[in-house]
Image (cartoon, helix red, strand yellow):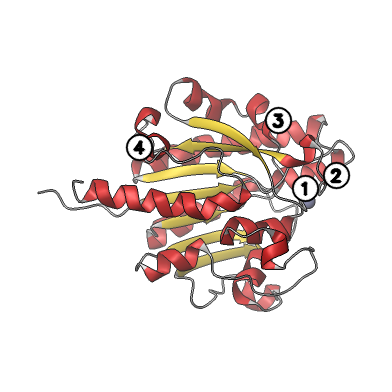
Amino acid sequence: MSVPTPPRLAVVIADGLRADVAEQAMGHVWALVEAGRATATRYACALPGLSRPLYATLLTGLLPVDHGIVTNEAVQACPATWLHDAHAEGLRSGVVAYHWFYELLSGERFNPLLHRQAVPAGAGIVGARWYFEDAYPDSHTLADAEALRQQHQPELLLVHPMGPDDAGHRHGGESDAYRLCARRLDGVLAHALPLWHAAGYDVLLTSDHGMGRDRMHGGADPSERVVPFVWMPHTGRAADALADQLALPLPVGSTGLRDFIRSHRRLAQAQASGG
Ligand SMILES: [Zn+2]
């Protein structure tokens, strides 16, 4: 009997990455899709399509009107998240994300000099790197994530690159600079994905919201709202992906990520036990 391997999952939330630009500009990720090694779809994010409310929605599975964090200025803890779910099952998480995630998980205002690597209690986080400049490069975010993964081998890895959102606010969602940012993120992922897959991590790429040509997001226009959802299992066999095996609805929507992650764990555990 083989030793069960723990289910491993890397969740990449690329901030402000709209679906059409992801599909057009991210050649490595879509090479996996074309080769049948990944499954891609898209969904319209919950409203308001603002970052902090949607970080909380992606983490908790609740709509902003239900979790109550409806502005970017709200510094408060969100309800229990999928990190807490995993912690309750004895699994460990690593997080590299913008400091607003720290505030959602800790309930306290982020202080760069105190909290750069602080670990909020109760969510099973064994290692964290919080950045606090919108222009923090995606290459650094991914390198931080890989360093953290090598150090802790967490079962869950949450990685949150800010590049597309920052480029979109500076230049607009239909600018060359915004597309270039998506291309660069794709290039960084081309380095990270083989490492993560080899270590047994299934990888999920999605976004919180899109980006309008007017350099903003938040409303209901498809450019601001439609985001990618790409499932890249470490087996390289998308036909065996949990979406097929569990008949999980794809796209999951902003509120469906928590259930998707829970279902992934159920399937991985069943497979590890020979079920
Ligand atoms: Zn933004």
The residue that mark 3 highlights is 21
Q: Residue at x 40, y 61 (%)?
A: 151
Query: Label 1: few (<14), some or many (≥20) within 10 Å?
Result: many
Q: Position of residue 202 (x, y in %)?
A: 41, 43
Q: Residue at x 49, y 25 (%)?
A: 33
Q: Position of residue 264 (x, y in %)?
A: 40, 48
Q: Position of residue 233 (x, y in %)?
A: 40, 38
The residue that mark 1 highlights is 166
Q: Residue furthest right?
A: 214
Q: From the viewer's perspective, is residue 217 above or below residue 74?
A: above
Foreground residue among 6 and 224: 224
Front disc: 1 or 4? 4
Name the element at disc 3.
Answer: helix
The residue that mark 2 highlights is 170
The residue that mark 4 highlights is 245
Residue type at numbered disc 1 = Asp
Q: From the viewer's perspective, is residue 211 above or below residue 22?
A: below
Query: Label 2: few (<14), some or many (≥20) within 10 Å?
Result: some
Foreground residue among 260 and 200: 260
